[in-house]
Amino acid sequence: MSNQSPTIERTSRLWRLDDPDKGASDGPIALLREMRVLIWKHKFALIACTVIGLVLAGFYARSLPRTYASTATLLLEPRKAAVPGKDVDAPQALDLNRADSELQIIRSERLLSAVFESLDLQSDPELGPQPPSAMQGLLAWARSELGGYGMGLQLPGATAPRSSSVNGKVRNPAADARLEAFSTFAKRLSVRRVGQSYVIEIEYSSIDPTLPARVANAAVSGYIMQAVSFKAEAVRARSEALQGRLDALAAQVNAAGEAMKNGSLPAIPTPDADARVIGAALPPLSPAGPRGLLITLLGGILGFLFGSSWVALSLARDGKITNADELVRETNVPCWGLIPAAGDHNAIAGHVLDEKPAYAASIRDLRTSIEIACLALRSERGLVIAVVGWTAGRGISTLCRNLSQIIRGSGRYVTLFRAAETTDQRGEEAHLVAPSLADAAVLGTSPDQLVFENRHGVAVLPIHSANETANLFVDFRHPRVSRILDAVRLKGDVLLDLPALDKSKDALALATHADVVVLVATLGKTSIGEINSGLQQLRRARAKLIGMAIVGGR
């Protein structure tokens, strides 16, 4: 038999969607209030996770290499006709489609290859094969471990080993290195339009502070060279082209080519380029990346989200009782309050009630709640009140001892049958024939032969015997036990401090003799599943359960 709550029940502890008693307090405001309570309750775990995220993200940001970026800007202008004559300076139409075409020209492999060769970037070590990073090393280790099991997995970022031949032909290592360097160069060069305007930005990033400006300017000069070369070839192809026009175009081409080699802009005006340089790329003054502050803040946010998820999953998984409202909502059984922890006090009289006023007030409120629930059962005889918990604990036994003291203080005679010895000294009463309820039930001792220990005005008798044989053969449902309790209740109220439900069924047997039963849960230790299991066992035994209480609060 499983005591695990269904999935819907477990998730409902975080957000009650099926609560039939929804009122004005439910809704977004109530959800925010619950979230605030959860965040405050688990603030140390959330702060720890957030700090860990910030620290890890900060170390990761500091481990990244510093990159520099530089941007050159082009403004596309209407292209003039390349045919001399009457309409030699007539501008052609410039629309958004042509702007997109010019953008693709700048991105073309032809132009990028020219820039790549002009600046001799093939020998740049930054574009060559790089040593594996820590993350790549981790992925390589994972791939080797998984490969050992024959799974044949291809991890992200992992590349298949290159073959030394393609279609029977031996590969050229130099050509492969040049191709890989050019691919890396093309990825680092960014060409984009500014919105829907005719302004084009060419940006390049590198760990070398001086290289981005040279590459961006070289790309602009290469585009100008191609545009001017196209016009030069068109004019040269026509016999009516003027030599002066050719010389001017040739000068512009030479100036643009020289500027591209030097990583700068043309030294002379280039009116035939159909583009005007409005912003030259300048060496960056500071690194463009990585953005350490942004990464650190993102790490802190991720750490906080992880901590929140961990707290939510922990609450949904363990299901420990945290407050009385939750206990009532999950069981539909009245809960009479949260009783603070009593500390290490074990005595019935004085110590706890005198030194802990809040604890004494909670015990008095519990006594009052029991009295109200038992108004219809009050008669000339006393009440038999059973207190039981799912697991054994000093808090429940201390509650019973001090509850008996509160009842005695109201003027009633009280008899306490306690579940176990603590640090008591029995002294001369150790020779009694029936020193416990179990001994009396096994030996058939009459009620008038029992000798109770007087502890600060409360008659006390253990439930179990020091003799394990007597505990083994005792039957607490026997009429002898009922006769003993009936005889004792003629004097006043009887309080049964029952054994834990998870250890023995003696608690169920004794609960059937009680007029009322109070089930006690321990704050932060007893789960909802354990409480539901205890309720089911008490109901199957037909015990008269009237309410619950929680011990262990502050």
Image (cartoon, grey):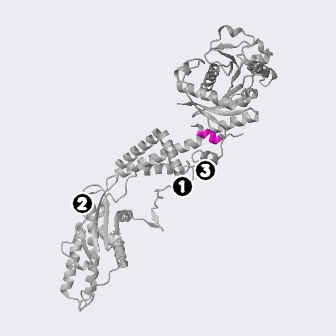
Amino acid on which the number 3 mark rests in the picture = Leu
- The amino acid pointed to by label 2 is Pro
**Earlier-in-chain disc, 3 versus 1:** 3
Mark 1 residue type: Leu
Q: Quadrant of the N terminus?
A: top right
Magenta residues (range): 325-330
Residue tagged by mark 1?
153
Which element type, helix, strand or loop, lies under badge 3? loop
Marks 3 and 1, how far apart at CA: 43 Å
- Mark number, residue 17: 3
Q: Which of label 3 and label 2 is nearer to you?
A: 3
Image location of residue 321, percent across then percent down: 59, 37
Which circle, 2 or 1, is nearer the viewer?
A: 2
| Residue 139 in view (yes/no) | yes
Spot occupied by residue 386 in the image (x, y as percentages of width and height): 70, 27
Q: Main secondary structure of the magenta part?
A: helix
Above or below — where is 20 with respect to 374?
below
